[in-house]
């Protein structure tokens, strides 16, 4: 099994009415329920857009520095993510496609590096 990150940048969402978003919520929750039923669910969640905290922790100078705001000024930022644990890339693609259809915007998929098992 391998873990895959399925995510979207908030800017990919586009401009839609509040009603459009209300219609999409149950569709997205249904896909997450299907992922859970398939025992492939690890985590899913959307990030707060405007009111949530955004800060950076940076220790590269040798001292910990916390700074309000994103590390890089960018027009794109992470809007939400789902992590699945599936047997192969084809299954990860299938879940990403289901999420994209339910949400109504693109999803990007990346595989996590395999975890090293420590012996001891």
Image: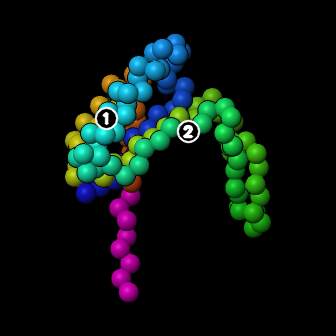
Residue 12 horizontal/vertical position (percent): 49, 25
Q: Which residues are magenta?
A: 113-120
Residue 58 horizontal/vertical position (percent): 70, 57
Residue shown at 69%/50% (left/top)? 56
Q: Quadrant of residue 72?
A: top right
Residue 73 horizontal/vertical position (percent): 69, 36
Q: Is residue 46 above or below residue 27?
A: below
Q: Tell me how far mark 2 sits from mark 1, CA to CA.
A: 18 Å
Label drawn at residue 31: 1
Residue 116 visible in the picture: yes
Q: Quadrant of residue 35?
A: top left
In this picture, residue 41 sits left or right of residue 12? left
Residue shown at 52%/12% (left/top)? 17
Q: Which residue is mark 2?
A: 47
Q: Quadrant of the N terminus?
A: bottom left
Per the picture, the main secondary structure of the magenta-coloured stretch is loop
Residue shown at 30%/52% (left/top)? 85
């Amino acid at each position: 099994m391998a873990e895959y990150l399925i995510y979207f940048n908030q800017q990919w969402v586009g401009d839609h009415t509040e009603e459009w978003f209300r219609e999409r919520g149950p569709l997205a929750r249904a896909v997450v329920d299907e992922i859970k039923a398939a025992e492939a669910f690890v985590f899913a969640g959307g990030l707060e857009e405007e009111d949530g905290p955004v800060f950076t922790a940076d220790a590269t100078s040798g001292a910990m520095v916390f700074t309000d705001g994103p590390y890089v000024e960018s027009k794109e930022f992470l809007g939400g993510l789902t992590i699945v644990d599936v047997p192969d890339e084809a299954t990860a693609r299938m879940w990403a496609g289901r999420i994209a259809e339910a949400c109504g915007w693109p999803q990007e998929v990346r595989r996590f590096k395999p975890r090293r098992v420590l012996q001891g």
